Image (spheres, helix red, strand yellow):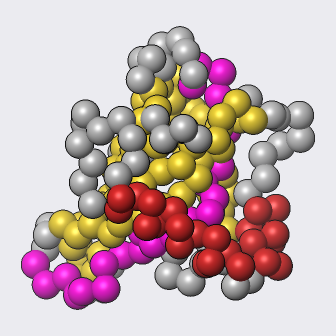
Amino acid sequence: MRLSRHSKKFDFRHWIIAAAVPFALVQSPNASADAASAVDAPSGTHEIKTLTATGVQVYACEYDAAHQLGWKFKSPLASLYDDRGQLTVHHFAGPTWRAGDGSAIKAKVAAQAPSPTPGAIPWLLLSVTAHSGTGLLSKVQYVRRIDTVGGTAPSTPCVKEHDKGESPYFARYVFLE
């Protein structure tokens, strides 16, 4: 599920993923509440923007300490859309987010919780470690990744060192100051 750099709105594939989220979350409301509280930002923060992401989690086939090949997470590659379907932010390795206005942030994981959706990447609270530019992201101090669907390591075994694998995912990113 690659997104064109020129894509400004959701296409049909994105709506399919987005439509799946409410059904996945209905399965375990208590787990959703537990995951949400585990990745709450500190008191006194408030939301700047919530964006919907579609993209892939990129994995590489690497040897572990026991010299066994396995998928190792490398980076996200996603496009984040506002509530009108407008492409607003690109998300990539770092982890880094870069808005269309040139503002950007880099962050590190501060907390995580298993996703209440089976087979989905964890929910995260990330603490911003670096800012650049002015605009949408210039005052962001925390990022929450919630409502995740998909994105776990590929189900096919990796057999050749350095091979890449991608896993489609959906998430909501909440930017807080």
Q: Tell me where residue 80 appears, x and y as whole percent.
A: 46, 43
Q: Is residue 131 above or below residue 60?
A: above
Query: Is 142 a magenta residue?
Result: yes
Q: Compared to 35, does 86 lie above or below?
A: above
The residue depicted at 24 percent of the width and 86 percent of the height is 156
On the rendered structure, is 171 left or right of 13? Answer: right
Q: Residue at x 56, y 83 (%)?
A: 118
Q: Residue furthest left?
A: 160
Q: Residue 131: horizontal and vertical position, in percent?
A: 53, 22
Q: Quadrant of residue 150?
A: bottom left
Asked whether 130 falls inside the magenta stretch, the response is no
Decide which of 161, 174 is in the foreground and name it.
Answer: 174
The reply to whether residue 96 is visible in this rendering is no
Where does residue 11 sit, x and y in percent of width and height? 35, 52
Question: At x 25% / y 33%, what residue is drawn?
Answer: 6
Task: Give the magenta part as a residue range.
Answer: 137-160
Is residue 71 placed above or below 60 in the rendered structure? below
* Left or right position of 152 against 109: left
- At x 57%, y 32%, the residue is 129
> Magenta segment, principal secondary structure?
loop
| Residue 143 x, y percent position in the rendering | 63, 43
Hey, which residue is sitting farthest right in the picture?
43
- In the image, residue 150 sits, relative to residue 52, either above or below, namely below
